[in-house]
Amino acid sequence: MSATRGTGGFSFTRIGAMVLRYWYLLSNSWPRAVELIYWPTVQMLTWGFVQLYVAQNSSFFANAAGLFVGGLLLWDVLLRSQQGFAFAFLEELWSRNLGNLLMSPLRPSELIVSLMVISIIRLGIGMIPVTFLAIPLFGFNVWGLGLPLAVFFVNLVIAGWSIGLVIIGILLRQGMGAEALAWSLMFLLMPITCVYYPVATLPAIVQPIAWALPTTYVFEGMRAILVTHTFRIDLMATAFAMNALWFAVAVFAFYRLLAAARRAGSLLQQGE
Amino acid sequence: MLMGLILPDAGAIRILGHDMPGERAALLERMNFESPYVDMPHRLTVRQNLTVFGRLYRVERLKARIDELVEDFDLAAFVDRKAGQLSAGQKTRAALAKALLNSPEVLLLDEPTASLDPDTADWVRGRLETYRAQTGATILLASHNMPEVERLCDDVVILRRGRIEDRGAPSDLLRRYGRDTLEEVFLDVARGTRAEGVEPAAARPAEVEP
């Protein structure tokens, strides 16, 4: 009788449906697409001019061009991948559509994969134009980093997803009261993960915390390329290992929070 | 709980011979629901919403199915309008079309005619009767509208403070309570004013089998 009769297994069709839903949202609302590009551009312009000024007054920065802009662009990859992941989920809360999704055959694992894909799409729309803008304006070509750029990118995106996963788990359990986390949690990491300065700058007591973050290895690796022109494979290997651990912990936390929300009935009370 | 959104404290739920929430994803492909308390995304058009949900439910020949529902539910005038711009009646019709996209064997409806004008409400009830007659689907309806319950249901469960107070076919309830309408039966149960000698039917597990 039904138009469909499935086995309930993992489905790429359902992932495609979620991505299509988000694509419709973007294409129906141009301010959303503009907003994706707006903040990375503003940030890049601000830090780019700061770097130009500092480079004119410091031989170190003059020789290590791109430290600020490079740090900023990689930071934005991290921030936007987390926000893209969490905001795509928040869209479902804002539109009161979460009930439809959670009472559909969509599996939590399919929801996670679809949010990953959407975060990459958002990242592409927001970041690619900005990276090209940095070339004529500040003479910094992030694409010139080549293979290391791909390694940095993958590590930062996975780290962003891990944090995004924990945030949406908390949103499922606590409702919209936890919405601010999606906007702000990543900024807690910013001073510790050493986006613009080496880990050695931090107080000794904070440095172990910094080294516990996979993202710290990426920013240190970027500085190694820009300052000493060496690609530190050891840093990247550690970043991958730590990311694998962090992602596994985030998936575990997400499923535990979802189960707790199901037990508490909080999935039906997603308002503030 | 029937849709796997809340876990039961105790007991088991079996629908169409399968365990919920153990076989949740497979079961939900054969079920659907409509509720005024859950919206379709406002910024998507009705057609875009139906396309997305059709893919979520892996509906075969989706475009043809959507065209069929557009005709059945008279959606043509607003199918390309954003869901957030629809009137209450149009929203209900669109939501019902979404609920029937996968031709569910079990359809859960929460107050399907709440806030609708009498004409649209009557039309919706007619559509549900037709769907049930054509497909033999089980419809689980939650409603405070007793004339609607009397018209659509052949098995009525009356709840009070989360517990089953009575259960039976509408004619059986009317006979046992000595009342002319289910509304009067409902008031007897709600106010605890049932006549002497009226014994509630023994509660039994709900069964939803093909």
Image: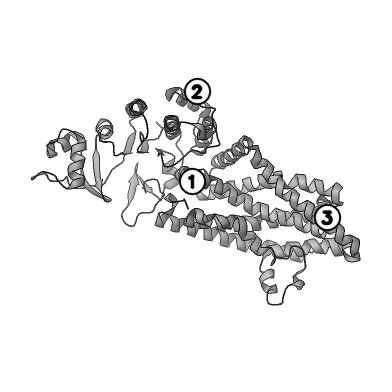
Write down the quadrant of residue A234 in the picture: bottom right
Residue A203, x across and y down, in percent: 72, 75
The residue to which callout 3 is attached is A49
Which is in the foreground here, disc 1 or disc 2? Answer: 2
Q: Is residue B177 left or right of residue A246?
A: left
Q: Residue at x 90, y 63 (%)?
A: A57
Indicate whether A187 appears above or below B156: below
> Which residue lies under the disc numbered 1?
A98
Q: Nearer the viewer, mark 3 or mark 1?
A: 3
Disc 1 chain ID: A
Q: Which mark identifies residue B77?
A: 2
Q: How many marks?
A: 3
Label 3 and label 1: CA atoms lie apart by 43 Å
The residues tagged by marks 2 and 3 sit, at their Cα atoms, a distance apart of 54 Å
**Contact, CB < 8 Å: mark 3 with mark 1?**
no
The answer to whether any part of residue A256 appears in the image is yes
